[in-house]
Every structure is written in structure tokens, then in C-alpha cells.
Amino acid sequence: MTQEQIALLELCIVGGLGLLLVLAGILVAIATKSRNSRCTCASVGKVVDYYCKGEMRVGPIVEFETWEGATYRARKKFEGYKSTVFPSLDESEIREGEDGYLHTRRGAVGRWRECAEALWPIGSDQTVYYDPASPQKRNYVGRPATNKFVTVFFILAGVGVAALSVALFFVIANG
């Protein structure tokens, strides 16, 4: 193989990977928008429990009833989690930010269930939006998830890989 052919092969393989990453980011955005646009029905549900995944991923589990009378459960999802650690703190605290993130402050020991109970008491009301065709799978509590971080990450990674492939192409072809 000539050097130009190797450079072209590299451009196709690595550049193609970059384009696939960009495409994945666009597909995530489209799927999220489609999912959220299908959630046309609203119901007021009650907090019945909490989930806790890891150190700071906590949220309410809301039980809601559809207009047909069926009962389902939905977990509140966040855009992301922002945590601050203060080793001198005795207590932890959590709050929902306007940006869709769950903000946590914790000391040496995190008592997430107590924090969740204070923020979302059992029996408190939460609005649930759901897809009438599939309320168990397509629902969200409060605000829709946008998956903005995942979308931007895939698109930027794809653009970076594609740019790298073009740079490598010129280096290989002229080297």
C-alpha cells in the first residue's frame, strides 16, 4: 500500500468513527425529544419511597394513577449531580437546582435517606407526565430529562475524533 492509500484508509476508519459518535449524539437528542413529546398526560402522584444509587444519587419514587385508573411508579430523574464535600460537616443536605441538577453537600457521613425525606416527604405531591400508550416506560416526574450532557459529549467527542483523523491524514500523506 502506498502512503496515500494508508492515509485515506485512516481517514475513512477514524473519521467514520467520529461521524458515528456525532450521529449517536444526534440520535440521543432525537430519542429524548421524541420520548418527552409523547408524555402528553399529567397526573399528580404521591411520593411512596426513595431510591439511592451510590453516594449522592438519590430521589423520590412517585406512585401515580393514569386516567384509565391503572397505578404505576416513576423515579424522578435529574440532568446530573453536583456534589460538594465538607469533611467538617456533621449533616448532609440536598436540594434541587433550577438547572435540573441535584446539588448535594455532605460531610464525613452522608445520610441520604434523611435528606430525601426532608426534601420529598412521603405522601407529598409530585406531578408526573406520561405517555398514555406506555405509562410504565415513558414518564417523568416534574421536568423532562434532556440528556444534554450525553448529547453534547457524543457530538464533541465525534467532532474531535473527526478533526484528529483529518490532521492524521495530512501527516501520513505528507510524511
Image: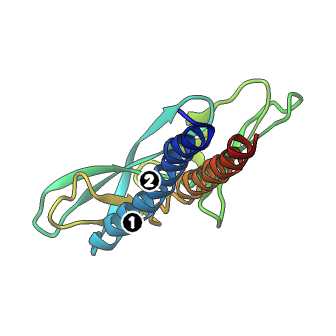
Where residue 20 appears, x then y in whole percent? Answer: 45, 50
Decide if residue 162 is on the left or right side of residue 134.
Answer: right
**For numbered disc 1, what is the local secondary structure?**
helix
Residue 105, image x and y in percent?
76, 41
**Which sits in the foreground, 133 or 98?**
133
Q: Residue furthest top?
A: 108
The one nearer the camera, 13 or 53, is 13
Where disc 2 sits, the SS reads: helix
Q: Residue furthest left?
A: 68
Q: Is residue 45 visible?
A: yes
User: In the visual, does 43 lie left or right of 58?
Assistant: left
Q: Residue furthest front?
A: 2
Quarter of the figure with residue 33: bottom left
Instruction: Please give the name of the residue rendered at 51% of the width and 41% of the height, measured from the top-left corner.
Output: 9
Left or right: 133 in relation to 11: left
From the image, tell me which residue sits under label 1. 30
What residue do we see at 69% from left, 40% from top? 172
- State which quarter of the image contains the C terminus: top right
- Tell which circle, 2 or 1, labels the residue nearer the N-terminal end: 2
Locate residue 46: give its quadrant. bottom left
Whether residue 128 is visible: no
At label 1, the amino acid type is Ile
- Inspect the image, locate mark 2, and give the three-letter code of the amino acid beneath it: Ala
In the image, is residue 146 above or below residue 59?
A: below
Q: Is residue 29 above or below residue 173?
A: below
Residue sticking out furthest to the right: 88
Name the residue: 79% across, 31% down: 107
Whole-percent x, y for residue 125 in the image? 41, 62
The residue positioned 14% from the left and 64% from the top of the image is 133
Reading the image, the residue beneath label 2 is 24
| Label total for image | 2
